Image (cartoon, rainbow, N blue to C red):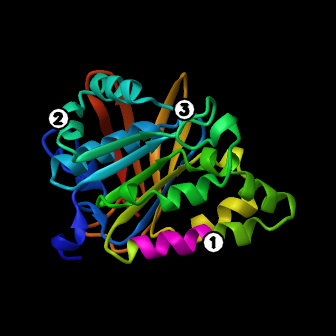
Amino acid sequence: MPRDNLLSLGLGGHDRLNKELGGGIPRGSIVLIEGDYGAGKSAMTQRFSYGLVDEGATCTVLSTELTVRGFIDQMHSLSYDVVKPILNEELLFLHANFDSGGAFSEEGGDRKELLRRLMDAEVMWEPDVVFLDTFDSILRNDPTFESLIRQNEERQAALEIISFFRDIISQGKVIVLTIDPSTVAEEAIGPFRAIADVFLQLEMIEVGNEVRRQISVKRFAGMGEQVGDSIGFSVRSGTGIVIESRSVA
């Protein structure tokens, strides 16, 4: 694939992630990063967003877990300094506050139509890449989605969201979703797996007394160079993502 169709993850002198993933993420794609709690989904989101901004792309990061201060501190601990990109409006960080009447709650704390309100928040969809971390938490906190699930209409609910996502990526933008599969019914997550152009599973594997992390590449449509089917990595304080090994299919 031509380089101008890829958004580089950068940081070539820092780690090998961009090279291992074929030179970047294809424009106009939906990326699904799936993994259990502690597998490294947020760390991978942080690495992706920092590298993309460093390469000149603009990003929105919506987090259901971190506040702005928590995000800056976490990025700093990984040697990803995002203060300047945030001040320069190259990176927009949003905290989805589901617990205390925040941005996605009505007055009085009643949560309503979370996904619809996200879709209507035009400013968050303007950047080149939009991260929803964690998307499963957004789904679980949306009463409309929950109602459809109770009616066994998970697939219909998912398809409505997917239609909106397709409109966004038709503009050449990228949407990155992180999901913990243990928190969402298979019927709800299945459609997102099916439509993802890039599908990465983060796994934790016990080897002796050690727990190793790896990226299992389930799908990578529109890849640049060869992409490994299994990429070992670690998350190190003061360093960030470190690529450990690679196995090519």
- Answer above or below: position of 25 versus 124: below
- Secondary structure type for disc 1: helix
- Which of 226 and 249 lies nearest the eye of the viewer? 226
Mark 2 highlights which residue?
A: 84
* Residue at image point 35% right, 39% down: 46
* Residue at image point 19% right, 50% down: 10
Residue 5 included in the magenta stretch of the image: no
- Give amino acid for label 3: Gly
- Secondary structure type for disc 2: helix
- Secondary structure type for disc 3: loop
Is label 3 in contact with label 1 (beta carbons under 8 Å)?
Answer: no
- Which of 95 and 140 lies nearest the eye of the viewer? 95
Is label 3 in contact with label 2 (beta carbons under 8 Å)?
Answer: no
Mark 1 highlights which residue?
A: 160
Q: Does residue 185 show up?
A: no
The quarter of the rendered structure image containing the N terminus is bottom left
**Residue 11 location (% of width, % of height):** 18, 44
- Give amino acid for label 2: Lys
- Which of 203 and 41 lies nearest the eye of the viewer? 41
- Answer above or below: position of 20 versus 205: below
- Give amino acid for label 1: Glu
Where does the magenta region start and end? Answer: 160-168
Per the rendering, the mark at residue 38 is 3
Disc 1 residue crowd, few under 14, some 14–19, many 20+, Cα 10 Å: few
* Residue at image point 42% right, 61% down: 175
Disc 2 residue crowd, few under 14, some 14–19, many 20+, Cα 10 Å: few
